[in-house]
Image (cartoon, rainbow, N blue to C red):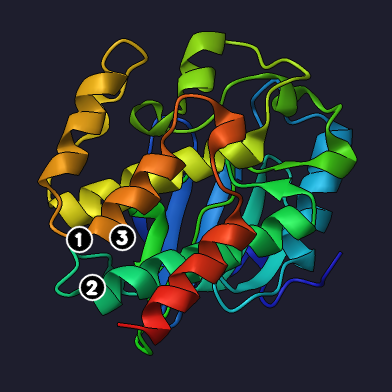
């Protein structure tokens, strides 16, 4: 485990607390660093899970994944320090920007998949835009790793309900061996992409029963390539959806011809 860059006792003097929620999670900022303190007082945070969680977080390194400066375990929490990214995602102003968004997100998520990691909480709030114009995926607190798939956290549904895939909604509480978290992440990214292009919050309309009405919004999108991409990403059958490698290649190809 990496040595801490500062004394834990002095953390509150250096970091200004931005969020302190009821779950025991705190988010603080100091200059170009953001620090998240995650409470360990939950059932899934057993010793094996904490060990795998720390190892996985520290091993990540990709231009489209939030840069982790350090991760370490305190007495009652896990402390994650990352680079500060200021800009939130905004609705797309032109087709090129939309394709850059899809390309960057698909590339970052494909990197996670190659390392056996599913994000499990893809939503607008978890994708930021850097000062260089690159889209960055943040907040991997709900990630699951194939290497540690037997830990308790992997058995339960996690994420943000409005971005759940249809198969996640049907499962309700517990996952099954047939559940594919990567294909579920594809659906969630498709929901975000639809919202960003349509410029309307649609997560509240995402339910298994109302999926057909969600498809209705696709016909109102001006760009045929966007309609086709989103249609394939939010299909009801997960095995009919493209993978992140295919999405990245498609976005790259469209960018070259736009």
Which quadrant of the view contains residue 114? bottom right
Q: Which residue lies under the disc numbered 3?
A: 225
Whole-angstrom CA distance, mark 3 to mark 1, is 6 Å
Q: Is residue 73 left or right of residue 91?
A: right
Quadrant where the N terminus is found in the figure: bottom right
Apparent side of residue 185 relative to residue 79 in the rendered image (left or right)? left
Question: Relative to 55, is 91 on the left or the right?
Answer: left
Of residues 237 and 115, which is closer to you in this image?
237
Whole-percent x, y for residue 255 in the image: 38, 80
Left or right of 233 on screen, residue 106:
right
Question: Which of the two residues, 194 or 111, is positioned nearer the viewer here?
Answer: 194
Q: Position of residue 130 (x, y in %)?
A: 38, 80
Residue 13 visible: no
Residue 91, placed above or below residue 123: below
Labels 3 and 1 touching (C-beta < 8 A): yes
Which quadrant of the structure image shows residue 160? top left
- Read off the residue under disc 1: 223
- Tell me whether the residue at label 3 lies in contact with that at label 2, contact meaning CB atoms closer than 8 angstroms: yes
Give me the C-alpha separation between circle 2 and circle 1: 8 Å
Q: Depth-wise, is mark 2 or mark 1 nearer the camera? A: 1
Q: Nearer the viewer, residue 143 or 81?
A: 143
**Residue at 74% in and 31% down:** 45
Identify whether 215 is placed above or below 186.
above
Pointer 2 residue: 95
| Placement of the C terminus among the 4 image quadrants | bottom left
Numbered tag placed on residue 26 in the rendering = none
Q: Are marks 2 and 1 in contact (CB under 8 Å)?
A: yes
């Amino acid at each position: 485990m990496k040595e801490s860059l500062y004394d834990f006792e002095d953390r509150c003097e250096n970091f200004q607390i931005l969020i302190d929620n009821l779950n025991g999670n705190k988010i603080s900022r100091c200059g170009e660093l953001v620090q998240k303190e995650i409470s360990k007082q939950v059932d899934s945070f057993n010793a094996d899970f904490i060990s795998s969680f720390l190892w996985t977080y520290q091993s990540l390194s990709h231009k489209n994944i939030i840069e982790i400066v350090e991760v370490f375990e305190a007495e009652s929490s896990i402390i994650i320090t990352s680079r500060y990214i200021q800009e939130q995602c905004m609705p797309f102003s032109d087709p090129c920007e939309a394709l850059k968004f899809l390309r960057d997100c698909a590339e970052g998520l494909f990197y996670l998949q190659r390392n056996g990691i599913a994000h499990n909480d893809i939503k607008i709030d978890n994708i930021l835009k850097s000062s260089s114009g690159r889209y960055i995926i943040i907040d991997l607190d709900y990630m699951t790793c194939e290497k540690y798939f037997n830990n308790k956290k992997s058995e339960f549904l996690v994420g943000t309900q409005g971005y759940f895939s249809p198969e996640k909604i049907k499962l309700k509480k517990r996952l099954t061996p047939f559940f594919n978290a990567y294909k579920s992440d594809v659906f969630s990214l498709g929901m975000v992409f639809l919202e960003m292009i349509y410029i309307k919050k649609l997560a509240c309309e995402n339910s298994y029963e109302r999926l057909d009405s969600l498809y209705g919004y696709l016909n109102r999108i001006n760009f045929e390539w966007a309609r086709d991409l989103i249609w394939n990403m939010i299909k009801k059958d997960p095995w009919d959806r493209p993978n992140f490698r295919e999405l990245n290649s498609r976005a790259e190809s469209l960018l070259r011809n736009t």
